[in-house]
Image (tube, rainbow, N blue to C red):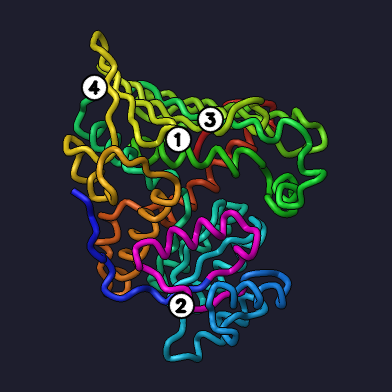
């Protein structure tokens, strides 16, 4: 059933920090947030250059007086307005996330933040404590988790259709950085600079996406220990890795494997998650996100299609255009933004149970992503050894 109803009572008054002209990720945020009329873009500090930011904001039909030179001015001035913003999205380089997110929470705003949420577990826990104290949402844009068939896979695993879970294999391995493209591309250059991205490149930038999907599919599984080996095949990127392998041992004996790479030459995207049980397996590939591969031992392979009536109610909630019409990344992001808006409404009325039922990548997902990267780096720097997960 196509869900065409407006789900938010009144659109959330919303602003952006970063995401200015030429920003691919900024465009993704706006397309997603505005798609279902859940948010209204009213203000922003869109660029580190105030004039460029103002010019771009006006091109988006944001009032000139609400195009601010920086995030601190944005938060301070909007707080004075009776129609001031309620939420902000952060689409800036990684090294700025903690300071901006902290300032937004202190200003009483809901936050949607690019990943990684910050660089250290200590910083992440500071944000978690502040979000709980202020009763504000912190959503993290693990956008691929918004695809319908991720929710379908979760429902099938929970129903026991795979039997006892034994393994989960994850990868995000593209080939677009097989050479030192950052030398000629400023938008890539900061991604391989520790000052801007912290202690890792592909572990934080790529691997956390399939890792979060695996968390979504197996919410009750906890890692006991992991081992990480990372490489810098383009030597100028050292000490940051452009390729990494992670082995994980979960509680209950489930084993996990994750491959993250930006040097998988010829691969377009290469993000896949495969969950293997004692009876059957499920595999989802983000280059074909409208299909979920279901393999029962001894039976023909089944391909489940998005939008079909045989899917779970959770998956059908995200249907917009019916079966047969392919949906893509913007719809997946819009599914998350729609749930972010519902969560913001729920928190504003102190309904935490409603927030938990939405299944969004919130502050806990942000903290866990930072914790996982931190453990991977610790293992790799110790010589690719097993480290206890705590």
Contact between marks 4 and 2 (CB within 8 A): the answer is: no
Q: Give the CA separation, mark 2 to mark 3.
A: 39 Å
Bounds of the magenta span? 16-45
Q: Give the CA separation, mark 1 to mark 2.
A: 36 Å
Contact between marks 1 and 3 (CB within 8 A): the answer is: no
Residue 137, by quadrant, is: bottom left
Give the residue drawn at x 81%, y 45%: 184
Q: Secondary structure at mark 4?
A: loop
To which residue does mark 4 refer? 163
* Pointer 4 local density, CA inside 10 Å: few below 14, some 14–19, many at least 20: some
Q: Give whichever of 156, 320 is nearer the camera.
A: 320
Q: Give the CA separation, mark 4 to mark 2.
A: 45 Å
Q: Is residue 235 above or below residue 186?
A: above
* First along the sequence among labels 1 and 3: 3
Q: Give the CA separation, mark 4 to mark 3.
A: 27 Å
- Nearer the observer, disc 2 or disc 3? 3
Kindly tell me whether residue 23 is visible in this rendering.
Answer: yes
Give the residue drawn at x 24%, y 8%: 298
To which residue does mark 2 refer? 108
Position in image of residue 59 (x %, y %): 59, 73
To which residue does mark 1 refer? 286
Kindly tell me whether residue 219 is visible in this rendering.
Answer: no
Give the residue drawn at x 51%, y 73%: 15
Q: Is residue 199 above or below residue 12?
A: above
Q: Secondary structure at mark 2?
A: loop
* Pointer 3 local density, CA inside 10 Å: few below 14, some 14–19, many at least 20: many
* First along the sequence among labels 1 and 4: 4
To which residue does mark 3 refer? 270
Position in image of residue 354 (x %, y %): 24, 61
Magenta residue check for 263? no
* First along the sequence among labels 4 and 2: 2
């Amino acid at each position: 059933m196509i869900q065409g109803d407006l789900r938010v009572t009144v659109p959330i008054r919303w602003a952006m920090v970063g995401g200015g002209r030429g920003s691919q990720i900024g465009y993704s945020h706006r397309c997603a947030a505005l798609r279902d009329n859940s948010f209204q873009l009213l203000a922003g500090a869109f660029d580190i250059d105030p004039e460029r930011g103002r010019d771009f904001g006006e091109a988006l039909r944001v009032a000139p007086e609400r195009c601010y030179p920086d995030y601190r001015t944005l938060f301070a001035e909007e707080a004075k307005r009776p129609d001031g913003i309620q939420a902000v999205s952060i689409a800036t380089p990684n090294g700025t996330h903690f300071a901006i997110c902290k300032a937004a929470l202190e200003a009483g705003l809901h936050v949607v933040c690019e990943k990684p949420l910050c660089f250290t577990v200590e910083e992440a826990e500071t944000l978690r404590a502040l979000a709980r104290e202020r009763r504000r949402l912190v959503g993290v844009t693990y956008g691929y988790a918004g695809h319908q068939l991720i929710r379908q896979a979760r429902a099938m695993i929970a129903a026991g259709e795979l039997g006892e879970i034994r393994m989960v294999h994850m990868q995000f391995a593209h080939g677009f950085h097989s050479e030192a493209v950052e030398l000629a591309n400023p938008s890539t250059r900061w991604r391989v600079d520790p000052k801007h991205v912290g202690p890792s490149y592909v572990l934080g930038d790529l691997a956390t996406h399939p890792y979060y999907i695996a968390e979504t599919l197996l919410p009750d599984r906890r890692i006991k220990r992991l081992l990480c080996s990372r490489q810098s095949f383009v030597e100028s990127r050292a000490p940051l890795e452009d390729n990494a392998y992670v082995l994980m041992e979960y509680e209950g004996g489930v084993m996990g494997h994750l491959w993250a790479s930006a040097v998988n030459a010829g691969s377009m995207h290469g993000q896949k998650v495969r969950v293997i049980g004692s009876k059957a397996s499920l595999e989802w590939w983000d280059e074909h996100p409208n299909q979920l591969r279901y393999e029962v031992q001894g039976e023909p392979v089944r391909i489940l299609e998005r939008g079909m009536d045989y899917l779970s109610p959770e998956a059908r909630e995200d249907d917009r255009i019916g079966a047969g019409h392919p949906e893509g990344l913007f719809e997946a992001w819009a599914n998350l933004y729609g749930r972010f808006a519902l969560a913001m409404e729920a928190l504003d009325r102190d309904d935490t149970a409603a927030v938990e039922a939405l299944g969004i990548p919130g502050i806990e997902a942000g903290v866990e992503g930072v914790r996982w990267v931190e453990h991977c780096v610790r293992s790799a720097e110790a010589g690719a050894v097993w480290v206890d997960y705590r």
